[in-house]
Image (cartoon, rainbow, N blue to C red):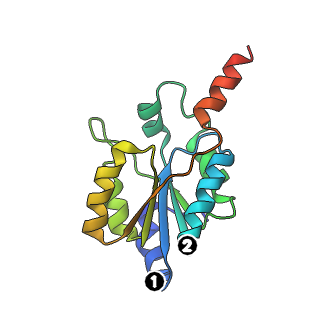
Amino acid sequence: MIINEKDLPKIREKHKHQKIVYCSGSFDLVHIGHVLHFEFCKKQGDILVVNIGSDKDIQRNKGIGRPILNQKIRLETVSLLKPVDYCFVGQEFKDGQSPFANLESVLKSLRPDIYVINKDSKSLIPLSKTMAQKYKFKLVISNRKHPISTTEIIQKIKNLD
């Protein structure tokens, strides 16, 4: 189900007796690696809430030409995946801010029981550990190696020329 970030406290209240799992990412060109990630996340609890990066944030993080698919398409696609209960497009961070500037706001509003990140999100791990202590959630660092990445898919397509 597609929600707005402002709905996060309502989600927490609605599912107060269930374990809420939270994850975030670009999810550009949704592929099997993303689906496996969502399945892993869902196994950690009862309700999976996914934060999808805004177009502007992804372009800042990954460069010109990204995302390939706009946030509306990515949001609609992720919302249709079986493991995902709720998804939303995260608030854009302001120029000069860290790409993770809005993380605390989301964690404070949703109050997840579990937050899942990938081990390749090295820059996010220290901040996530701090937030886990502050907001009393379990941080799960996934060691899953995904079979392919969006960047690899893009490179394969470029090599077809």
Q: Looking at the image, which residue is at 55% across and 62% down?
A: 41
Residue 47 marker: 2
Question: Which residue position holds label 1?
Answer: 16
Please state if 87 lies on the left or on the right of 12 as rendered: right
**Would residue 155 be visible to someone looking at this image?**
yes
**SS at badge 2:** strand
Question: Residue 159's x, y, as percent?
Answer: 69, 17
Question: Residue 87's x, y, as percent?
Answer: 55, 60
Q: Looking at the image, which residue is at 69% across and 64% down?
A: 82
Residue nearest the viewer, comparing 92 with 154: 154
Mark 1: amino acid: Lys
Q: Tell me if residue 51 comes above or below residue 67 in the rendering.
A: below
**Would residue 2 be visible to someone looking at this image?**
no
Q: Looking at the image, which residue is at 41% across and 32% down?
A: 60
Q: Looking at the image, which residue is at 64% across and 54% down?
A: 36
Question: Residue 97's x, y, as percent?
Answer: 28, 40
